[in-house]
Image (cartoon, grey):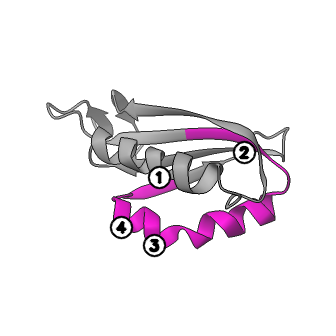
Amino acid sequence: MAGATARTEDGGMNTLHIEHAITEFGVWKAAFDRFAEMRRDAGVRRHRIAQPVDDAHYVLVDLDFATAEEARKFLGFLQTSVWNTGNAPALVGQPQTRILELADEYSES
């Protein structure tokens, strides 16, 4: 089937999925951008940022890694060095996170 991708034997792509409330997107995005080099060095292959259409004070972030271990390590970095240290000025409350493994994907070609 064209455009479909099934789970690979090694698990394929692993995504650190993060959701949290924010005070202001511009302030949050500037802080996010300051960590670009750290994301790259940690193995982030791609990131996606989304917001609900009805809530400008909430973000969903997907960071893609080759392995779940890379995702776990970066999550640990975020928890100890960013979220709990004042390095996340627009963050409201505690982020909700999950590490996801791609099970199936389809894209219209």
**Image quadrant where one finds the N terminus:** top left
* Mark 2 or 1: the one toward you: 1
Residue at the (69%, 37%) spot, across then down: 94
> Callout 3: helix, strand or loop?
helix
In the image, which disc is placed on residue 41? Answer: 4
Q: Specify the amino acid type for callout 2.
A: Gln
Find disc 2 in the rendering and name its residue.
51
Disc 4, disc 3: CB below 8 Å? yes
Find disc 3 in the rendering and name its residue.
37
Find disc 1 in the rendering and name its residue.
77
In magenta, the rendered stretch is: 18-47
Please report whichever mark, 2 or 4, sits nearer to the chain's N-terminal start.
4
Q: CA distance from mark 2 to mark 1?
A: 24 Å
Q: Position of residue 12 (x, y in %)?
A: 25, 39
Picture quadrant where residue 3 is located: top left
* Mark 3 or 2: the one toward you: 3
Please report whichever mark, 1 or 3, sits nearer to the chain's N-terminal start.
3
> Callout 4: helix, strand or loop?
helix
Q: Nearer the viewer, residue 50 or 71?
A: 71
